[in-house]
């Protein structure tokens, strides 16, 4: 998840702080996902991230990074 957020921020020329503002999340919430690799953000948090990036949740998870996610759980 961390890498997907970073990739999408780069694609959208957006900083993590900018994403936090657009998503209505605290910077500490995003930092916990990005810096400490929190692997269990809630669906509500993912949805807010998607809103901030102006994409759907489906678009967020439509990436090869999530191809073998069952193996990581």
Image (cartoon, rainbow, N blue to C red):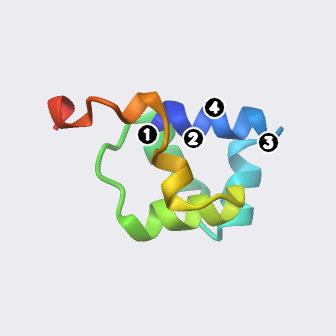
Among numbered discs 3 and 4, the one appearing first in the sequence: 4
Name which quarter of the figure residue 26 lies in.
Answer: bottom right
Mark 4 = which residue? 7
- Is residue 5 something one can see in this rendering? yes
Give yes or no for contact between labels 1 and 2 (Cβ–Cβ under 8 Å): yes
Locate residue 70 relative to residue 7 in the image: left or right. Answer: left
* Image location of residue 27, percent across then percent down: 61, 55
Please tell me whether mark 1 sits on a helix, a strand or a loop. loop
Q: CA distance from mark 2 to mark 3?
A: 10 Å
Looking at the rendered image, the quarter that the C terminus falls into is top left
Q: Which residue does the numbered mark 1 point to in the structure image?
A: 1
Q: Position of residue 39 (x, y in %)?
A: 31, 43
- Quadrant showing the N terminus: top left
How far apart in space, not on screen, are marks 1 and 3 (Cα)? Answer: 16 Å
Q: Are marks 2 and 4 in contact (CB under 8 Å)?
A: yes
The structure residue drawn at horizontal position 79% and vertical position 43%, both measured from the top left corner, is 14
Q: Residues within 10 Å of mark 3 (few under 14, many from 20)?
A: few
Answer with mark 4 or mark 1, whichever residue precedes in sequence.
1
């Amino acid at each position: 998840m961390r890498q997907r957020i970073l990739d999408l921020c780069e694609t959208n020329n957006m900083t993590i702080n900018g994403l936090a503002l657009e998503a209505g999340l605290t910077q500490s919430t995003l930092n916990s996902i990005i810096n400490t690799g929190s692997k269990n953000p809630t669906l509500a948090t993912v949805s807010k991230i998607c809103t901030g990036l102006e994409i759907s949740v489906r678009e967020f998870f439509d990436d090869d990074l999530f191809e073998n996610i069952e193996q990581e759980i």
